[in-house]
Amino acid sequence: MLDSSLKNKFEFILVEPSHPGNIGATARAIKNMGFHNLSLVNPKDFPNDDALYRAKGAKDILDNVKVYDDLSSPLEDATLIFGTSARTRTIPWPTKTSSELGTVLKKTLESSNAKICFVFGREISGLSNEELQMCDYHIKIPTDEDFSSINLSHAVQIISYVLKMELDSIDSTQEIKDETPTFQDNEYLIDHFDKVMRQIDFYDQENPKQVKTRMRRLIKRLQPDKLETGILRGFLAKIEQILNKKN
């Protein structure tokens, strides 16, 4: 049985879903597995009776859906973010399959402010590169190479099922450690690095060659803790102080 204190730490996010029926089916899918936090980013048609019909007994999920204008808003206080992707990207990102979640989840759930988000893209085009770069990991569902397309709610059902199986094996009484940096904390750190790099002319601003994107990937991969993030911000602030004295 999935512990309620754990399931509250998870949120499923649909980005610009075009069909209300998929929203309802998603609500049903996550409730089947004991989850109930569902957020929507710019849904094309919601609320809608079709969503309610497809949700069946998950009306309570729809009644409590949170709707946002942009993806960064629901991610602001997230401590771990998975973005679903079936395509190979220009800049490779840390990737997990749906069967490799256990170790990462266990580590994250040890933090006192744990909030883990699973982001699903548009039915036709999925998530954009910019949206995927907001995520700590990309997650892929192993499918047949000749037919890899999965319905949105089916993808949610698979992920939520695997997630429940992993959580059932995690001790919910494990020791809770200090807070983990949130998505917003990491964004501040990434922007701070970029600001200092521009101040010292580290890269050509007219031809940045994805320097900031690669810095983002580095920080996402390293996942510094709260203290380490503070040290890096302090280091950057000291550099700024020295630069200002020279000017």
Image: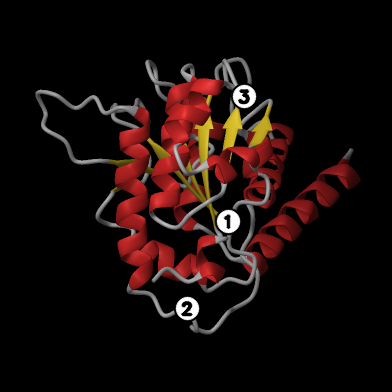
Q: Is residue 210 visible?
A: no
Give the SS element for disc 2.
loop
Location of mark 2 (residue)? 172
Give the answer, above or below, for where 165 lies relative to 170: above
Name the quadrant of the C terminus: top right
Residue 34 image position (x, y, % from top left) = 44, 58
Three-letter residue code for mark 1: Thr
Give the SS element for disc 3.
loop
Q: Which residue: 62% across, 48% down?
A: 183
Eye-nearest disc, 3 or 1 = 3
Q: Is residue 27 visible?
A: yes
Three-letter residue code for mark 2: Ser
Three-letter residue code for mark 3: Pro
Could you tell which of marks 1 and 2 lies nearer the N-terminus? 1
Q: Which residue: 42% across, 70% down?
A: 106
Location of mark 1 (residue)? 79
